Image: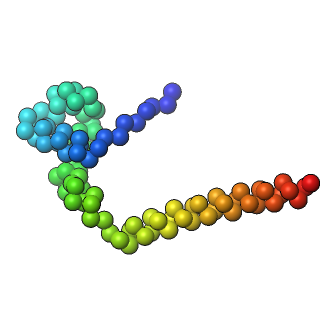
Amino acid sequence: MKKIRKNYSLEFKIQAVSLSEQRGNVSSVAEELGICKESLVNWRKLHKEGKLSKEKQISSDPIREELLRLRKELEETKLERDILKKAVGIFSKR
């Protein structure tokens, strides 16, 4: 059976972390919010390291963005190439 993975927004994660820090009890906050305790622990760790913040999400490196764009474009080009190869094979048999 395939597990369905839930995606939580950055705002939800930040609010959950702040709530757990206020109350001090991770288990009860996780149960109250309907999330896994381990997820909340990981979010707290990321928040402590500074990796879970709005500023980090907004200000991303332009070189990294370009790299991601080029990788996506390369993948699409490879897919188109493979489709055309298959089409040539199909039409050349006729």
Q: Residue furthest bottom?
A: 63
Task: Describe residue 71's horizontal placement relative to residue 19 as left or right.
Answer: right
Task: Describe residue 92's horizontal placement relative to residue 77 as left or right.
Answer: right
Q: Specify the quadrant of the image occupied by residue 49.
A: bottom left
Residue 37 position in % (x across, y down): 24, 33
Q: Nearer the viewer, residue 30 or 93?
A: 93
Residue 8 position in % (x across, y down): 31, 41
Q: Specify the quadrant of the image occupied by residue 59.
A: bottom left
* Residue 86, above or below 4: below
Q: Nearer the viewer, residue 19 or 55?
A: 55
Q: Residue furthest right?
A: 94
Number of numbered markers: 0
Residue 15 position in % (x across, y down): 17, 41
- Residue ID at (26%, 47%): 10
- Residue ID at (13%, 42%): 18
Residue 91 position in % (x across, y down): 86, 56
